[in-house]
Image (cartoon, rainbow, N blue to C red):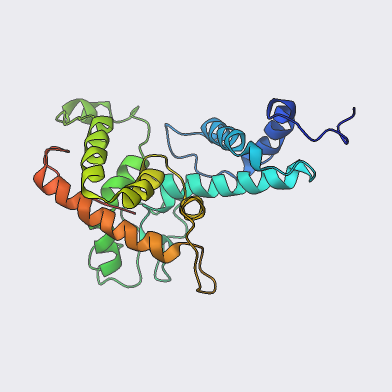
Amino acid sequence: MDDQEKTNFTYEDKSLEIDLEIKKRRGKWFLDSLAWFDFEDVEQIIRAHIHKKWHQWDQRRSLKPWINKIITNQMKNILRNNYSNFVRPCLNCPFNQSCATKDGGEASLCGFTKSGLQDSSCPLYAKWERTKKSAYGIKMALTLENHSNEVQAMEDTNFSIVDAQGKLNFFMEKELSEKQFLVYKLLFIDNKDEEEVAVEMGYKTSEKGRKAGYKQIKNLKKIFKQKAQEILDKEDVIPDTDVLAWS
């Protein structure tokens, strides 16, 4: 039986074809500033996702369009989760005057503020600085090669993120209804995107141009944020934490 007649291919049967399609996208990946995250990591994430979704491929149809749709969506998701959700709003602002600077920098020029710099006198920048700047600093961690003295002089404030997340999940399960916690688990423990969660929960929408489940998930995320903040205020989940940033 040749390939045209066979309709029960396994992931392993097509692994070389999958790898080739992923490697073709190397030139589309531009987030190389993360010292701990490169395109090899991206490849592994995409391969794992294709393997997970393998049963959804209609093998009567061509493989390449299906693979490339997944690759495109995963690259967007990875960029969003590791960069886009945390960057300064200045990068898409019409007053941004730092086009010549690759990453914007802390002293980038602005046509809106009195100082002429991108700073907290702009309400959008102030909100980003208050809610997302610290997360952006973590996401954009760079090499320590030229900063060893500063790092050695830093106070050790390490704590286990895994343990803290586990504690938060434990208390969230107590505070939420069974259905609410299922959505929370799908979003923040299983790390599924909102469309996948909407499909799994059977959410729909009557609004044109809106993704299925948009309103339901938006409202649930507000509840999750409120409950999580209440837990952080009264439980010893994260030492000395009074702010929770949800993107």
Q: Quadrant location of residue 14?
A: top right
Q: Is the N terminus in the top left, top right, bottom left or bottom right quadrant?
A: top right
Residue at point 53% right, 35% down? Answer: 45
Query: Percent x, y for residue 127?
Result: 26, 62
Q: Is residue 72 left or right of residue 174?
A: right
Residue extending farthest right = 1
Viewer-proximal residue among 247 and 205: 205
Viewer-proximal residue among 35 and 47: 47
Residue 38 in view, yes or no: yes
Q: Is the C terminus in the top left, top right, bottom left or bottom right quadrant?
A: bottom left
Query: Percent x, y for residue 46?
Result: 57, 37
Q: Determine whether 220 is above or below 163 in the image.
A: below
Q: Determine whether 190 is above or below 145 in the image.
A: below
Residue 116 in view, yes or no: no
Count of residue discs: 0
Query: Percent x, y for residue 235?
Result: 11, 41
Residue at point 38% right, 54% down? Answer: 87
Residue at point 44% right, 54% down? Answer: 101
Query: Percent x, y for residue 206?
Result: 51, 73
Q: Is residue 52 left or right of residue 90?
A: right
Viewer-proximal residue among 6 and 139: 6
Q: Quadrant location of residue 226?
A: bottom left
